Image (cartoon, rainbow, N blue to C red):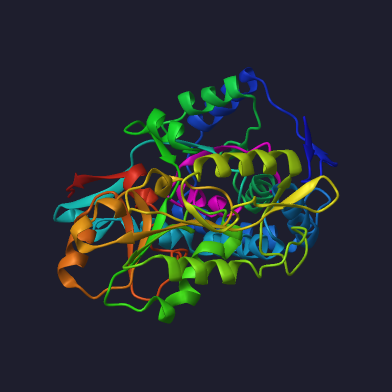
Amino acid sequence: MTVTDVAGAPVAELSLVPKLFVTRAMDALRKARTLPAAERTAALARAGRIFAEETIDGLGFEEYQRTVARVSGVPMGVVRAATAAIIEATEVAPVAAYQARPVGAVDDWRAEETRRGSAVWTRKGDVFAVHAAGNHPGPHSLWVEALAMGYRVAVRPSRREPFTPHRLISALRAAGFGTDQVVLLPTDYDAADEILRSADYGLVYGGDEVVRKYEGTRVLPQGPGRSKMLVPAGADWRDHLDTIVDSIAHQGGVACINATTVLVEGDPAPLAQAIAERLATIPSLPPEDEKAVLAVQPAEGARKLEAFLLARAAGTTAHLGGDGIVEELGDGSAVLRPAVHQLDRPDAEQAGIELPFPCVWVAPWSPADGIGPLRNSLVLTAFTDDEALIDELLAEPTISNLYLGDHPTYWIRPGVPHDSYLGEFLMRTKTVIRD
């Protein structure tokens, strides 16, 4: 199949492997032996350097980054940051992956503690499958942790942006991971299911339907973040406007850790207007431009998103984007401009809508509303020091990450969980005692 850029121009051809190829590749992963931990650590570090420094299948690092920006529509600056995170992940994965290990467990049965009896942290399985996302290169920094834990890994790339997983897996192969340790499997939808069926555990990205399909199974779904911000009466939003706006627009608003809803105690109109004024000044530029901030899509797809937003936003007060969010660049592509809508209550249906550009819903909130409107958040930034409220938010199971004070929703670093640790899903403890 042909991979095109945001203007529809052909960029590359992607060969799709048939189900038989998938079956044989997964069988090879199943039969392989895991590399020793020290070899995995060294190979991961080498892979990061190869990924960043070498020409891989004719693409230097700069050209690869420009290509990703053009095909995904993600701004060049975001691509640079995401690829830097991938490189860092290869260096720190052996440490970051083991942050999930219980404090009472050891890494290896040979540890001295097992002579007296100890928990040993070990894999639940051997083969891990990934259905990768194509809207952002960043998620590829996560699955390298599975390699660090000793899994053999199969990655099905997105047809939209296959360049990042291709480059990363090529680098891993060159660094010492064999063809039976990590594989790239571009497939159609039928063969894609075979990848998950043949693996012990899997990771998939998608919308609410994907989450519902795989929740509670051996496949870990990564869905919409619906990240939020709370500005209670004790905080003046003017002191935090930079952080609020940055949380909405950072990385073009395409990530699950971008803020999609801001709840404010009192009248939300002044805050909504201030956000709109800031976001309106962002320029519309092609994604490969170094100054680009906003995401770009083919014009036809952008118009469909615009129509969806306008239909769903009916009845709200538009401070920005009420007449549309598409600005065409004249080459068949279009910038997705920001949108700011004010809601009349915190539990309005629109507050749960997440779109792949800076689209924010600003709603009123009061302590009488409780934490109900704050549930189902990948990240919640709360500008509060109310200990009773903090206790309640921390105890709420549908709030994955809680940031207190002036911290943007997109804050993340290696070693802290994104949506729980991957190791919580892939590993377990066993008691070992030996002579």
- The image shows residue 384, relative to residue 120, as above or below, that is below
Say whether residue 104 is left or right of residue 25: left
Q: Position of residue 425 (x, y in %)?
A: 34, 43
The quarter in which the N terminus is drawn is top right
Q: Position of residue 116 (x, y in %)?
A: 14, 56
Residue furthest bottom as drawn: 239
The residue closer to the viewer here, 381 or 166, is 381
Q: Is residue 45 visible?
A: no
Q: Is residue 389 visible?
A: yes
Q: Position of residue 401 (x, y in %)?
A: 34, 59
Please name the residue shown 51% across and 68% down the image.
273
Please name the residue shown 31% across and 33% down the image.
216
Q: Is residue 35 magenta?
A: no
Say whether residue 314 is left or right of residue 382: right
Q: Where does the magenta region start and end?
A: 137-163
Q: Position of residue 331 (x, y in %)?
A: 85, 48
Q: How many marks?
A: 0
- The image shows residue 252, relative to residue 235, as above or below, that is above
Say whether residue 11 is left or right of residue 179: right
Q: Is residue 150 magenta?
A: yes
The residue closer to the viewer here, 400 or 155, is 400
